[in-house]
Image (tube, helix red, strand yellow):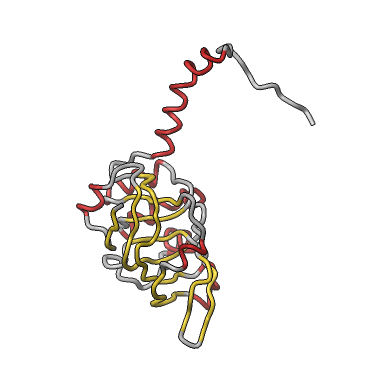
Amino acid sequence: MKDIKLPMSAEDVKSLKLGEMVTVSGMLFTGRSRFHIRAAENDIYPAIDYDKINCFFHVGPVMRQTADGWEVVSCEPTSSIRFERYGADVVRKFKLRTLIGKTTMGPRTAEALKEVGGVYLTKIGLSGNALRGQVKKVHDVHFLDELGKTECTWIYEVEKFGPFFVAIDSEGRNYFEELSKDAEAKMPAIEEELGIPHDYEFTEVNG
């Protein structure tokens, strides 16, 4: 399994195949709905060097302050499809090479990733408690007082973070869309083998 250094290079991005399992090591930043809305609609965003910290982790983490600073209690990725309305704008604005989240994203974000040379990575069989141990240091936090611990932006240093799999590649191909098309193409043969009529419809049940 590849461990990709962050920020991803253009070569790394192009080398990743749809469905491939990877981990990432380096610096990333976090955000949820408020990051997307504020960046896209209000031009308000954290003062980060987005050339050096170029991986956006979709998460609302559970954080705890200690005598030594902040630590991660849990960082379960949040569902990325919720951000599709603003996803493409954010990718283009910051020229993001790496998005990490849960589920998938839509065609507008996929097209933006293709334009800037980026990929979307998603979780499978991972818990936020497992990922917390891969966060080596919390370097900074932005808009904490204004947005709170869940919606503000954290800067993490991670090591072998994941594994995640490539759900949208640098060509804009979407793993879940292709999986759905493949399943749909196989259904007629499966229905025929099982003796299910082609005009079969599910029975509607009125509760």
Quadrant location of the C terminus?
top right
Q: Return the residue found at the far bottom.
A: 67
Q: Nearer the viewer, residue 118 or 47?
A: 118
Residue 143: image location, x then y, percent: 48, 75
Q: Does residue 142 appear anywhere in the picture? A: yes
Residue 24: image location, x then y, percent: 33, 60
Residue located 40% across and 58% down the image: 162
Q: Return the residue found at the far right.
A: 207
Q: Return the residue found at the far front.
A: 1
- Quarter-wise, where is residue 201 in the image? top right
Q: Does residue 33 appear anywhere in the picture? A: no
- Quarter-wise, where is residue 42 in the image? bottom left
Is 21 situated left or right of 195 in this image? Answer: left
Q: Is residue 75 above or below residue 104?
A: below
Residue located 43% across and 28% down the image: 181
Is 21 situated left or right of 194 in this image? Answer: left
Residue located 40% across and 33% down the image: 178
Q: Nearer the viewer, residue 172 or 127?
A: 127
